[in-house]
């Protein structure tokens, strides 16, 4: 029994190290695309935001078609959609306009992208994407973003 518990302990430590290594590496736009995600750099539509955004499989097409009620996307601090390594900024929640009823966004950044605005507390509002992308969706950032 003691030998079994020793082997079980070693297997647990090895598995824990492997999982910790995977978590430390994290995800990248290139890795997500290999898993079927769609990544884009919105800069051509919104020059103030050159950061890569990745959508789960099928979600970008559903957003473009207006058929997705909601989506959760990942944002990275890189302009390269094929980056193998990129700092993960956080997630963004998208909600179709007909399902948005003024609910608060507790993590969205304050007002315009200025240094002073970033020092203020969040304004707790979703941003409407219609003027920027032509999508009838609102978005809420889960990280400090200047948009």
Image (tube, helix red, strand yellow):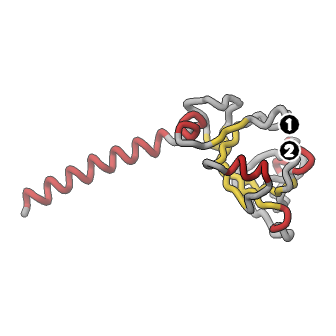
* Figure quadrant of residue 40: top right
Query: Does the residue at mark 1 contact the one at mark 2 (Cβ under 8 Å)?
Result: yes
Disc 2 element: helix
Residue 116, visible in the rendered structure: no
Q: Residues within 10 Å of mark 2 (few under 14, many from 20)?
A: some
Q: Residues within 10 Å of mark 1 (few under 14, many from 20)?
A: few
Which mark, by number, is residue 45? Answer: 1
Left or right of 31, for residue 126:
right
Q: Earlier in the sequence, mark 1 or mark 2?
A: 1
Q: Position of residue 50 (x, y in %)?
A: 77, 34
- Residue at 56 percent of width and 40 percent of height: 32
- Residue at 76 percent of width and 58 percent of height: 67
Q: Position of residue 61 (x, y in %)?
A: 72, 47
Image height of 106 relative to 56, above or below: below
Which mark, by number, is residue 133? Answer: 2
- Residue at 68 percent of width and 36 percent of height: 77
Which mark, by number, is residue 99? Answer: none
Residue nearer the viewer, 98 or 115: 98
Label 1 and label 2: CA atoms lie apart by: 6 Å
Residue nearer the viewer, 78 or 35: 35
- Residue at 48 percent of width and 39 percent of height: 25
Left or right of 15, for residue 116:
right
Residue 56, visible in the rendered structure: yes
């Amino acid at each position: 029994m003691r030998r079994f518990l020793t082997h079980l302990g070693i297997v647990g430590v090895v598995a824990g190290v492997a999982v910790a290594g995977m978590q430390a590496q994290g995800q990248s736009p290139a890795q997500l695309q290999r898993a079927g995600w769609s990544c884009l750099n919105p800069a051509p539509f919104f020059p103030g935001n050159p950061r890569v955004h990745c959508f789960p499989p099928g979600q970008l097409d559903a957003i473009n078609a207006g058929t997705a009620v909601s989506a959760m996307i990942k944002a990275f601090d890189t302009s390269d959609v094929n980056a193998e390594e990129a700092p993960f900024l956080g997630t963004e929640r998208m909600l179709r306009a007909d399902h948005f009823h003024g609910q608060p966004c507790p993590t969205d950044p304050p007002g315009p992208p200025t240094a002073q605005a970033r020092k203020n507390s969040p304004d707790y509002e979703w941003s409407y994407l219609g003027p920027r992308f032509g999508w009838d969706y609102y978005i809420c950032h889960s990280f400090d973003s200047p948009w």
